[in-house]
Image (cartoon, helix red, strand yellow):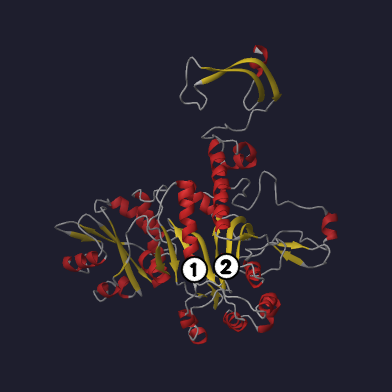
Amino acid sequence: TRRTAAELGREFVLQVTGRVIERESKNPKLPTGEIEIAADALVILNRSDVPPFTIEEESDGGDDLRMKYRYLDLRRPPLQRALILRHRMAHAVRTFLDGEGFLEIETPYLIKSTPEGARDFVVPSRMNPNQFYALPQSPQTLKQLLMVAGYDKYFQIVRCFRDEDLRADRQPEFTQIDCEMSFVEQEDVLEVFERWAKHMFREVLDIDFAEPFRRMPWIEAMEKYGSDKPDLRFGMEFHDVTGRVKGHGFGVFDDAEYVCGFAAAGCAGYTRKQIDALTEFVKRPQVGAKGLIWIRVEADAVKSSVDKFYTPDEVRAVAEACGAAAGDMVFLMSGPKFRTLTQLCALRLEVAQQLGLRDPKRFAPLWVVDFPMFEWDDETQRFYAMHHPFTSPKPEDVPYLESDPGRVRANAYDFVCNGTEIGGGSIRIHDPKLQAAIFSCLGFTPEKAQEQFGFLMNAFKYGAPPHGGLAFGFDRLCSLFGGSESIRDYIAFPKNNAGRDVMLDAPSAIDPAQLDELYLDLHTTAK
Ligand code: ASP
């Protein structure tokens, strides 16, 4: 035994027979630091090469290396905890929805391409030459067909595929908790899924939300926080001061459509250097602002970067309109309305981050409601569905569908927590005529609509019930509950930022014979 023990190395797999005894020199830092085994027999079941990085709570391996050896990284306690959390959450989802009478029904992965905003992944069909399946961006139309089919409460924990450029918290394949119900209105959906969310917080994190979640119209979220997914863990609401600041000879404000600002509580002490750094921050291309105006508010004095144009009383009045009190710093930005709001949002989050207000252990959930139906795109000069083309407009706004599509609001809602969109959905259209009208608003000719969505429009001819639902991003929900920025930690085998699985080395070239079978030719150079 002693001789075998001398051979042991890191990550060896052992079989030990012996007696568990109390350790003489206890090590409280180890999980098993109070005991040891007095071994009678020791068998090495398998040896291990020296692993490429340390497999401990904190690893010394870089990202790429750990992705390549994901199966070793997964041995580390933080990742084990993450996947255990994911399992428990999936279990809690199923328990709750089963208790509410939802059926888990699987839908296919090889489907027809139906645009939902992102690009489809496509799969060539060998049996149907020159034709392609698409992988679902979500089971949206299929779950609606299940409603037509009479399965009035559906859910599925389901993989979705979107061929998008990846951002930090995106993966080309990700998991949704996808749900749909018949004979419901918005209120019914929010009621069930607010109880579901509270159930999740209680079961998984032992956190009770006694109060109803806040409901915030989209326009309020935009005007107060500059985002349709406001982080409500802290205040710093925006205030529109356009009327107050114009007409004082300060050209930047005089020429601007919109001027708004917020008060950073207790930040009057910010140094010139700190303000300069924040100015640099908003000027970065990711934020894209031209500059930043500040007002330092003290009990007996105000100082600002626009003192030349305003009297101290005027400056103080602007600061107070932004909700500032003595000891605060006000930041103002100007420009086209929504662009300015979005830029100010980036600043608000940055300031909050610096002040330590984005505590991952605190949760501020809310519903954002009353989204606009359409979003105008300057580049292509047309309207796009803000949620997706199956979302119903608010009945009172239907008269404006043709005359003023921009003002039509949708029966759509998002579940938001800590500045992240965790889920979203809508009440759907179930009337084929209205659905045709919406397709037409979105620039589909009747022929194109029929070609792409004929299966759904036809189904609606056979007594489709009113229905609606939503889907939650399961990976994101896990990372929110786990207190981590990255959804990757909660996915056993994720892709990297270039959409590659570096462990499997995928995507990769395929055999010419395979290509032949699929009737595919390759461009010799990638475009
Ligand atoms: N299918 C939608 C999505 O993936 C969610 C829904 O409307 O239920 O965002």
| Label 1 to label 2: alpha-carbon separation | 9 Å
Q: Residues within 10 Å of mark 1 (few under 14, many from 20)?
A: some
- From the image, tell me which residue sits under label 1: 188
The numbered disc on residue 235 is: none
- Image coordinates for residue 188, horizontal then vertical, percent: 49, 68
Give the side of residue 410 with respect to residue 234, left or right.
right
Mark 2: amino acid: Met
- Image coordinates for residue 127, horizontal then vertical, percent: 84, 64
Q: Quadrant of residue 41?
A: top right
- From the image, tell me which residue sits under label 2: 181
Q: Quadrant of residue 228?
A: bottom left
Residue 166 appears anywhere in the view: no
Residue at (25% x, 73% y) in the render:
244
Where disc 2 sits, the SS reads strand
Give the side of residue 123 with respect to residue 415, left or right.
right
Mark 1: amino acid: Asp
The one nearer the camera, 216 or 254, is: 216
- Image coordinates for residue 4, horizontal then vertical, percent: 67, 15
**Location of the C terminus (image quadrant):** bottom right
Residue at (47% x, 64% y) in the render:
191
